[in-house]
Structures are given as C-alpha cells and as structure tokens.
Image (cartoon, grey):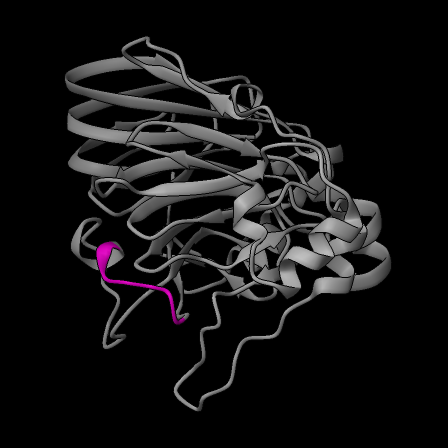
Amino acid sequence: MIKLKSVYQEYIWGGTKIRDLLQKDTGALPRVAESWEVSTHPAGRSIVDSGEFRGKTLNEYFDKTGWDKAGRYAARNRQLPILIKYIDAKENLSIQVHPGDKYAKKHENDNGKNEMWFVLSADEGAFIYLGFKRDVTKEEVKRRIADNTLEEVLNRVEVKANEAYYIPAGTVHAIGAGCLICEVQQTSNVTYRIYDYGRVDENGRGRELHIKKALDVLNYHRTQIADLKRRDTMSMEQYIGGMFGRNGKCTLLKYEAEGDLTILLPVSHLTFALVLDGSGMLYGAESEEKFQKGETWMMRGRATRVSGKCKILFVAI
C-alpha cells in the first residue's frame, strides 16, 4: 500500500472545503478549487508519499515497477486510465462539455473525458446542470449562448451527499455553488467552456470560451437523468462508473462503518482508497498502514481489512 500526495489547482471559483472539511494541508493557498488525488497527467502528477519511492511522481513509480501492474491501458499508454480529484465549488463552475476520444486525439492530442461525480457534501439547494431538458438544435444552442439564455434548456438537478452521477463525453454540464464532489474521470485535461456567467479575473479578463469546439461535440438530445444517476440503498453502496472508452470499467465502492471488517474489493488491477472521514488501519496481503481523514492510498489485491470508525471511497480499475 502506497500513500499519495495531492496536487492542488487554484481557480477563481474554488473555496476552502478541501482544507476545512477534508483537513488537507493546502499550505498558503487562499482557496483551492481542485485537489488531484490520483493523477499521471502532465498537468499535475501525484507524488508518492510513503515507502522507498517517496518524493517521486506516480509516473516515476510505474516507470520503475512496471506500467503493466496497472493494466493493459497503462502498459500501452504509460499513464493510468483515470484521474481522481476533489472539486470544491464555492461558486458555479462554467457550463461546459468534454469531447470523446476521437475528437480529443485529433484536436487536442489528449484523451476524451467521460467522468463520474460522487457528491461528498452539498449546501441547501445546491445543484448541478446535467444535459438538455429537451431536444435542441445546434442553431438554438448557438443563439442561446449569444443571448445568455442557455440555462433555460438545461436540466437543473438538486443534489445531496452520497449521490453519484455519470457524465458521458458530449453531455453539457456544470457543478453548482455549494457542492463538494469527488470526480473520477478519464485521464484528460480537455474542457470546452460554453458559458462562464460573465466572470472576470483580478485583471478584468474573462476566461476563454471554446464555443466552436463545444458545438462540434455536444449531444443535442434530451438527457434522461435517471439513466445517469447511480445509487443503491445497501449499507455498503456501490456505484458502477460505466465504460470509460477503451479504458474499461471503473467501480466505486463506499465503505462507512465502525469496527473491524474484511471486504472483498472488485477484481481489478489497482484500487485507490480515499479517506473521507475518520481514521484507522488498512490491512492488505503484505502490509498494514495507519490512515486518517484526507489521505489517499493505492493498493493491489481483493481482500482488504479495515479497522476503525471511518468513511472510505474505494475506486477500483
């Protein structure tokens, strides 16, 4: 089992929940929008924070130990198929869309981006935008972007903790203010912003929009929220992340208990344990480690014993 160190991203819409609720050491940053927990992407690579590779990037770790340990996709592309991050939306995120693999490879030299959101906490009335509430046309969307009425045709979904939503590439979406989310996505950093509420930075400049490319990749059909919402009422909830393109299936398993329990993780190459609350011990086949709130661990093997009062999100690939 290997502990990973986060990489922080500061954007204008970020807040302090990653520091205050997850108790992460964000240093002198006044706000943190994103905490990249598991990443081999050039825009922000995780750091190994335990063992003989401490201080090395996760990429350097796999360069030495073998990318095949993370599966066929990793061995072929020398990167993990997924990127896991926390997102703190103190303000509304821009309305945006991500391309699929084919378009992203051609235009951005990057992967496409399917993603999944697991809601950690949500203020009263917090919402997300997820897809169109009815079929629209490219011309209508273009007009509504110009006259600032795009929100009128979007699904506005109020959210609460422990809900999960799958967002396929091509689906227009946005995270609303007051949401703290764990996002599991394809390894990609391609986002096409459509609308940013007229915000400007400290220099009075608005952020770049990518309307032409967004119009190329949008799914203009009505989105059925029930098809994208993942929830089950078992005490140990499981959220299936669907197919991440050629990267395979990603499974989320939420563990919340007090005591000592051995759990069988999904058959996988790697599992990442994100400690959302509490503390305790993780026991694997060959090692045991103390953990505490805010930490992220990488492990292999199915049988894992958890001891302590805690809440952990396991992400298996």
Residue 286: x and y in percent read: 37, 28
Give the answer, above or below, for where 247 lies relative to 61: above
The residue segment tinted magenta is 12-17
Picture quarter with the C terminus: top right
Residue at the image point whose x is 58% and y is 29% from the top: 269
At x 68%, y 28%, the residue is: 248
Residue 192 seen in the figure: no
For the image, the number of numbered tags is: 0
In the rendered structure, the answer to whether residue 41 lies left or right of residue 129 reads right
Residue 66, relative to residue 94: is it above or below? above
- Is 34 rendered above or below residue 237? below
| Residue 81 visible in image | yes
- Residue 235, percent across and down? 27, 11
Q: Quadrant of the N terminus?
A: top left
Locate residue 279, reporting x and y percent. 15, 36
Per the picture, the main secondary structure of the magenta-coloured stretch is loop
Foreground pick, 208 / 195: 195
Residue 36 placement: quadrant: bottom left
The residue at the far top in this view is 234
Task: Choose between 80 and 214: the one closer to the eye.
Answer: 214
Q: Residue at x 23, y 43 (%)?
A: 123
Residue found at the far bottom of this picture: 203
Residue 156 lies, with reference to residue 207, above or below; the image says above
**Residue 131 inside the magenta-drawn segment:** no
Picture coordinates of residue 2, whole percent (x, y): 39, 44
Which residue occupies 45% across, 73% down?
199
Q: Is residue 265 shown left or right of residue 250?
A: left
- Left or right: residue 83 versus residue 223 is left
